[in-house]
Amino acid sequence: MVSKVFFSRTITPEKVLELYKMLGVELKGNVAVKLHSGEMGNQNFLKPDFFRPIIDAVDGTVVECNTAYEGARDTTEKHLKTIEAHGWSRHFKVDLLDAEGPDLELPIPGGKRIKKNLVGKNLTRYDSLLVLSHFKGHPMGGFGGALKQISIGIASSAGKAYIHGAGDPSKIWRADHDSFLESMADAASSIVERFKGKTVYINVMKNMSVDCDCCAVAEDPCMKDIGILISVDPVAIDQACLDLVYAATDDPGRDHLLQRIESRNGVHTIEAAAALGIGFRKYELIEV
């Protein structure tokens, strides 16, 4: 099987909406819009104005979850203040999915490392899902894209610790690394199943630092901006982004980003997700 991934080198809010319309998939009902609200102090995350046209078009609710590490988003009170400071709640409806417990447990019968995924109970409010991912490096995962956004991103605070620990939250930062990556793929599979056929993924290759938007102190971007990608396949869209980075041989910052990705075996999350059958690594890149 080959999945379609649409790609534009033009990076504007209007182009994001144009690509969504081109994809031809209408998200219906109550639409959850998963994005990264940005850690306080981070300079690289994509701001509300960039995503405003697409969020308004689907009449979506921005959804986020608390973190499992100390910072400006590890409690509901602090996270809501960060969301307000970064402008999300000024422009959009916002729902902190795990603002109050208990968590919702999603089964992962085919999971390689974990058999359940803990997410905010408010996820049950939504009929479809728009995943807006800022593609960049990541200190642990190697890179962050669609798969990370629907795994670690949608997991509750407790769920994040569970994934990082590959099923043992007490090993949140000490679990076998590939087992952590496989746990991310497992968790992603539960979200794909939950919103089967009702999900659109958009990856924006802009402000590409080796660090994630979860870092309060992050390196500035090291690569030139590449473009916007959209697909209904989270595996294909992340694979396409990796391939575009590798193809940017004339970019002096490419090797720095690749060192981060390769040193964390980042591609293994894609490999594990493909093995679970939630997407395909083979894709047709359609440049528009």
Image (cartoon, grey):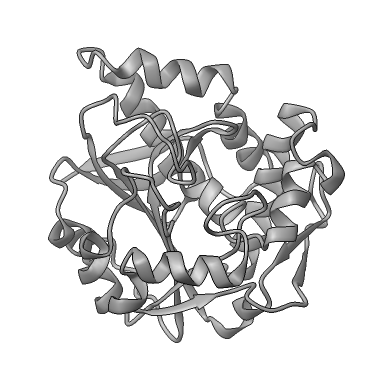
Please provide percent x and percent y for residue 31: 44, 78
Residue 267 percent location from the top left of the image = 55, 28
Q: Is residue 234 left or right of residue 74?
A: left
Give the quarter of the image for residue 87: bottom left
In the displayed structure image, the side of residue 284 where residue 249 appears, left or right: left
Number of numbered markers: 0
Relative image position of residue 138 (x, y in whole percent): 50, 34
- Residue ID at (20%, 70%): 53
Residue pictured at 83% horizontal, 54% vertical: 115
Residue displayed at 83% across by 57% down? 109
Taking depth in this image into account, of 77 and 228 the one nearest to the observer is 77
Q: Can residue 102 be seen in this view?
A: yes
Can residue 1 be seen in this snapshot? no
**127 on left or right of 184:** left
Compared to residue 61, the image places residue 67 above or below, namely: above
> What percent of the width, then of the height, locates residue 269?
61, 35
Query: What's the residue at 54%, 66% (across, down)?
Result: 78
Q: Along the line of sight, which residue is nearer the eye, 277 or 148?
A: 148
Residue 170 position by quadrant: top right
Q: Is residue 258 left or right of residue 156?
A: left
Place residue 75 in its image quadrant.
bottom right
